Image (tube, rainbow, N blue to C red):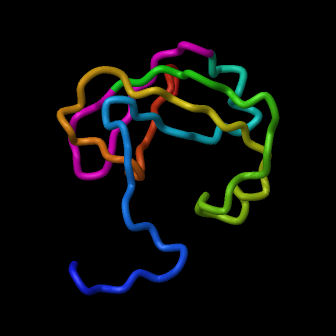
């Protein structure tokens, strides 16, 4: 709004290519052998009944401790691998950067 102040370090604008979205998921070490590059996956987002598809485009070569955004302390203590999933096809503008998603890998 005109006349408002912005604090140092605050975002004023976010620029994103909404035709090139991706999801970052963290896979526990025990589940990693079932994840393959170019594997097709399904995912959903909150408030939307539609199921979307994506393709595994990157699997981290090195494990890391679970990021703090994971919900329980037990899960945070595990070593996980970051997996990037490219969103496939049209989504009609429903998907936005930062939306949480539930990813379903084949066989789950």
Q: Residue furthest top?
A: 38
Left or right, 42 with respect to 85, comes to left
Above or below, 36 against 46 in this view is above
- Residue 53 pos. (x, y %): 36, 24
Q: Quadrant of residue 29?
A: top right
Foreground pick, 36 / 96: 96
Residue at 57 percent of width and 32 percent of height: 84
Left or right, 35 with respect to 52, comes to right
Q: Quadrant of the N terminus?
A: bottom left
Q: Residue furthest front?
A: 3
Q: Which residues are magenta?
A: 37-52
Residue at 54 percent of width and 73 percent of height: 9
Residue at 70 percent of width and 27 percent of height: 32
Left or right, 5 with respect to 85, comes to left
- Residue 58 pos. (x, y %): 62, 25
Q: How many marks?
A: 0
Q: Is residue 8 magenta?
A: no
Residue at 79 percent of width and 28 percent of height: 61
Above or below, 101 against 41 in this view is below
- Residue 28 pos. (x, y %): 71, 39
Q: Quadrant of residue 27?
A: top right
Q: Is residue 43 magenta?
A: yes
Q: Residue furthest left?
A: 92
């Amino acid at each position: 709004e005109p006349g408002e102040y912005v604090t140092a370090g605050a975002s004023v604008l976010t620029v994103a290519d909404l035709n090139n979205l991706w999801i970052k998921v963290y896979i526990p070490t025990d589940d990693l052998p079932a994840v393959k590059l170019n594997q097709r996956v399904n995912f959903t987002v909150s408030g939307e009944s539609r199921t979307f598809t994506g393709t595994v485009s990157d699997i981290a070569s090195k494990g890391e401790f679970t990021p703090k955004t994971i919900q329980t302390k037990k899960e945070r203590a595990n070593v996980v691998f970051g997996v990037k999933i490219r969103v496939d096809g049209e989504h009609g503008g429903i998907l936005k950067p930062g939306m949480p998603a539930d990813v379903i890998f084949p066989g789950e």
